[in-house]
Amino acid sequence: MYVPRLYRVEPHEAIQMMKAYPFATLVTVREQRPIATHIPVEVREEGGHVYVTGHIAYGNVQKETLDNNANVLLIFQGPHAYISSSWYEAEDVPTWDYLAVHAYGTSRIITGRELERALAAMLEHYEAHRKRGRLVDTFTPGYIEGQMKGIVGFEVEVTWIEASAKMSQNRNDRDYKAIVTELEMSAEPDDRKVAAWMRNRRPHLFTTEGGA
């Protein structure tokens, strides 16, 4: 991923982005052809390392590329928004603002109890806060084990991260504030999320003194 210096994200912030937007694109190569699967994953930090776990359908041929593969890519897409150049003070072309993380690493297949623990962690993440959330112990005994026959679990140890936050950092304060103002009026959730990210980076523009 091409990331100009202005848009580079520090690794610790990139990891938090991965955790915040865990619906990832898993990319590998099979017979010289790239394969991609869109799946939810779990991101964890342990002993100074970053691990990503997930699972794909048993019938997905990508499973053949996940056993001890040192060339795995996971793409995490954060909020993004179209930026109209009509919001700029001077003549310019429009653009697109976005957050994205590319996490590279080595994958391995996980099975048995390890896969059960990974599935339990995912349910805990997405269900624990819900009323009548479906955690592992709420299922009929043996049900989860039966469902596991239809999936292939994997873990990726992340070895390299590239992240880009292209969020109009190149604009002057006047244009920057105008972009945030326009995005905050949008009905699109991603537009408002981009605006919130930008607002947090230049808070002085939105105080009584700085925003006057």
Image (tube, helix red, strand yellow):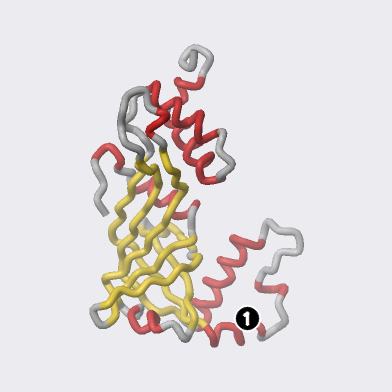
At x 45% / y 21%, what residue is drawn? 205
Position of the N terminus, as image quadrant, is bottom left
**Above or below, comparing residue 26 to residue 141 in the picture:** above
**Amino acid type at mark 1:** Ile
Task: Give the quadrant of residue 88.
Answer: top left
**Above or below, comparing residue 41 to residue 200 in the picture:** below
Q: Is residue 128 left or right of residue 104?
A: right
At x 38% / y 43%, what residue is drawn? 96
Q: Position of residue 69 (x, y in %)?
A: 29, 76
At x 35% / y 38%, what residue is drawn? 94
Local SS, label 1: helix
At x 47% / y 40%, what residue is drawn? 194
Is 209 in front, or is 18? 209
Q: Position of residue 40 (x, y in %)?
A: 50, 65
**Above or below, comparing residue 121 to residue 196 in the picture:** below
- Residue that lies at the very extreme toward the right in this rendered image: 132
Is 63 in front, or is 94? 94
Other residues around mark 1 within 10 Å, as few (<14) / some (14–19) / many (≥20): some
Q: Is residue 99 left or right of residue 193?
A: left
Provide the residue designation for mark 1.
144
